[in-house]
Amino acid sequence: MKIGDLAFDKENKVYINPDKVISYSDGEKNENYVFDSFKNAKDTSIFSMELFDRIKDWPSEYHFTTYRQNILRPLSIKENQTVLEIGAGCGAITRYLGEVGAQVTAVEGSLSRARCIAERCRDLDNVKVVCSNVEDVEFDQKFDIITLIGVFEYTAKYSQRENPFHTALESYIELLKPGGSLVIAIENKLGLKYFAGFNEDHFATPYFGLESRYGEKDITTFGREEIKKMLENVGFGNNSFLYPFPDYKLPKVIIADNGLEHEDFSPGDLVRFTKDRHYNPKPKANLLNEYLVWDSISENGLLGDLSNSFLIVASKSDDQDLVENSLLAQYYTCNRYEPHNTVTSFHSQDKEIKVVKERLNITNKEETESEKLPQNTDQETKYIKGSNLHHQIIGALFKKRYKVYENLMSKWIDYLRNETLEDEGASSTLVKPSFFDAMPFNIIVDSEGKYNLFDQEWTAEKPFEISFLVVRYLGMHKRNKGLRGKYASSHLDFVNKTLVSCGLDKISKSKLGQFEVEDEKVRNKINRNGGVAPQQFKKSLVFLVLNKLKEIKKYLLFGVFAQR
């Protein structure tokens, strides 16, 4: 049906092709919750506090999170560019495109989800919502950009065509203007998390994608070379790959191909600031430590091949300008009160790497207590080549090299004594307020062993003790009891053994509590609490027991007897 002939459903505020609606759903209860949240919210923008506070499980996190829109932030999408968003879901990406100022046609096959898009974007005149299977709509225009965010893998499931992936790409290339781009975000079936035993996202089974168990009509993901060849075979000759971490669903870091190739840039350092997410209560199949492995993968040039997801910008011509040639990577902080959410961009420029930190372009600044805490934004600095001190420290703990850990912490404390104290002298332990962020993850150790401090974003209200910084840093790892291993019997013991090894005095339990309260007060002025789906411990425990029983059965039937 021609798009101009679609009827407008006044109740749901969408243009609908009633005979071509599809039944994809997160569940009626979940989607009613999402719709009611949009309907009752005064603010439905990207950083809406009302929506953020409605996160209660994984489906609501997926639709309300402030991180999901980051998947398009590395792209230079301009105001009034025409965008066809296919499989728009409940409108998280649509909302971002609308706020950017693009002219958006959002196509969603499910009516319950399409009405969510319309409700979330009710104040945006530049967004049009269409409810239909995209194969059954005849468009009357060509587009600057077509997006498939978490959609391309579903093509065979909802297509009636032969060779559906190839045919779909052919139809998309015909809908693009000269110089237009197709944007795909999709899981990499060869992603490290899947080798580490994480369940395949769509089938909740480990190793499903790695072993290519997909059927003809199954949701299907691909490796980098597979999808690259598919694109080339239909005429997309210019294909830029970017790599979202931990994945395209909730990207905190996105690395460009240039970032993998630049000899002075260390993409692995950024990747290790992210943590892979397991989206199903069924347990992982093994306990590979991805934090340690990413370092080896990066050093051996395999980070792109083993990235958990891809962001692909595909074009017929060489003149696409969605991805800047200078871009190496971006790092996002999106869990804060406005206006403190930031993006840090890394660009190659004149044989150097420029680092720019700036506030995200937001539309609904909230007046909060965080305004009282001085923030240093809009920073532009040179990139420092070297090793991140935090990664050295955590690596030593994971590997149970406790003497190395103590030595690294002592060097950090020595640096603080020499560079950050309020008064000079051996007895002084008060740090200047401007060094509130002088933490190991903001220190690069260069090839000469020199400590280089960067990203001093926050300033404290008054001077503070060195011990407070130690407590603040170690407090980040308080819940990870396995990290301290046999080094310490409790968190207080962990803190005190570290302080003594650094030549500082032990602190009492009450002093530790006082420091933690002070730190929490500051963090609560900046960071929003919540925003992450709670873990389903009871359900996970049941799955774990069942899984172990299956393993025992397999061992008894096929292990013990097979060895005789």
Image (cartoon, rainbow, N blue to C red):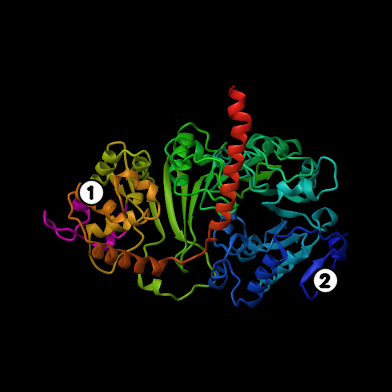
Choose between 376 and 440: the one closer to the eye.
Answer: 440
Location of the N terminus (image quadrant):
bottom right
Magenta region includes residue 30: no
Magenta region includes residue 424: yes
- SS of the residue at dot 1? helix
Where residue 132 sits in the image (x, y, percent)? 81, 60
Q: Residue at x 26, y 60 (%)?
A: 468
Eyeballing the image, is 346 above or below 85? above
Magenta-drawn segment: 415-439
Identify residue type, mark 1: Tyr
The secondary structure making up most of the magenta span is: loop
Identify residue type, mark 2: Phe
Q: Residue at x 58, y 56 (%)?
A: 539
- Residue hosting label 2: 8
Dot 2 alpha-carbon crowd within 10 angstroms: few under 14, some 14 to 19, many 20 or more: some
- Residue hosting label 1: 415
